[in-house]
Image (cartoon, grey):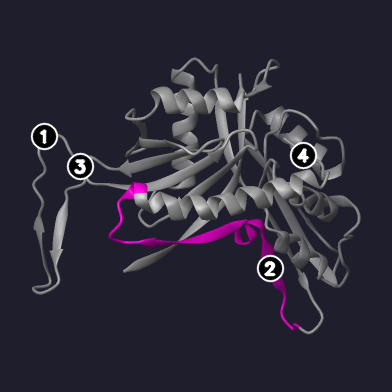
Amino acid sequence: MATVRTLDAYSIHGHLAAGSPGEVLLDYPSFFDALAARGVGRSLKVGTETVGPVDYVDLGGRMAFRFISGNDAESAEAYDPSTGTTIPVELERERFIVSSAWVVVDPEARILILERKRPGVPVYQLERYLSGFGRNEGFDRLSVSLNPVPSPSFVEEILSFDRIREASITIRRPNHSFTESAREAVAQIARDSNAGSATVQVNAERKESLEKDSGIVADIVSFAKSPITPVLNAVVKGFRAGFGKERTVSLKKHQLKATATLRDADSPRQQLEAVEASAIVLINQAKEVEEDGLEEID
């Protein structure tokens, strides 16, 4: 049997000495080299879950890590469909059941592809593990964020609106390159508050429309044309000709993604072949956007 798995694309943002005047960007190749050399087999607690990489494969310019996540406080049970009952699974020593997911990274392009599974390894667990591992390895006060890479369909949907009633944007605190309208406002709020993220929302006057070519909507469109942005999410609500009801378009629903078909009988390493093939497509799509000369914002 085969399973179709979704792969989501994220941009990687690592800040050293986060929140201080000396804040600088992470050296991504060095960081992931350290993860490959010393991270495999090392787990950290993320809330109640144990998270960490258990396998690493060098893909030649790209890197693949298989991450696990599990709770050592939960008892393991096996379900018998013939009887409709469960029996406890006795595990030796301090072992416990975990779920896993492949993560493919292109450090130079700053793109990370996460295999989405249920149960799997949520992106927030991956962020917290990478931050914690880096701090333990001497990367001073490292903060790692993984932000969704926008799909081209996101901009297309926004520009298709005839009237825009509401727009909002959530930005994780950046360290430079904010000079205009909503970008500067959100960045300043985050800096002054020492916040990890900040949200700005604007609403049009009754029966009026927000401008597409200036202000927050223009900023959202500009951000969405780059694969590397500090945007955690953006939402635009409005009306389009031929649709009677208001439509909502969000970055989270228009994240760059692909699918991979995995054979259930294959080992994780064998399944990686299909994951890598789709991951390469996503990484190249992100690189194509960057090579078009569009502004890259961190």
In which quadrant is the N terminus drawn? bottom left
Q: Amino acid at mark 3?
A: Phe
Separation of marks 3 and 4 at Cα, in angstroms:
43 Å
Residue 254 visible in the picture: yes
Q: Secondary structure at mark 4?
A: loop
- Between disc 1 and disc 2, the foreground one is 1
What residue span does the magenta drawing correspond to? 243-269
Please name the residue that numbered disc 1 is placed on. Answer: 93
The span from disc 1 to disc 3 (Cα, nearest Å) is: 9 Å
Q: Is residue 217 magenta?
A: no
Camera-side residue: 283 or 167? 283
Up-down relation of residue 74 to residue 151 (above or below): above
In the displayed structure, 108 sits above or below 277; it is: above
Q: Position of residue 248 (x, y in %)?
A: 68, 68
Tell me the tag on residue 248.
2
User: Pointer 4: residues within 10 angstroms few (<14), some, or many (20+)?
Assistant: some
Task: Report which quarter residue 162 is drawn in.
Answer: bottom right
Q: Nearer the viewer, mark 3 or mark 4?
A: 4
Instruction: Answer whether labels 1 and 2 touch (C-beta < 8 Å).
Output: no
User: Which numbered tag is attached to residue 96?
Assistant: 3
In the visual, does 53 lie left or right of 139?
Answer: left
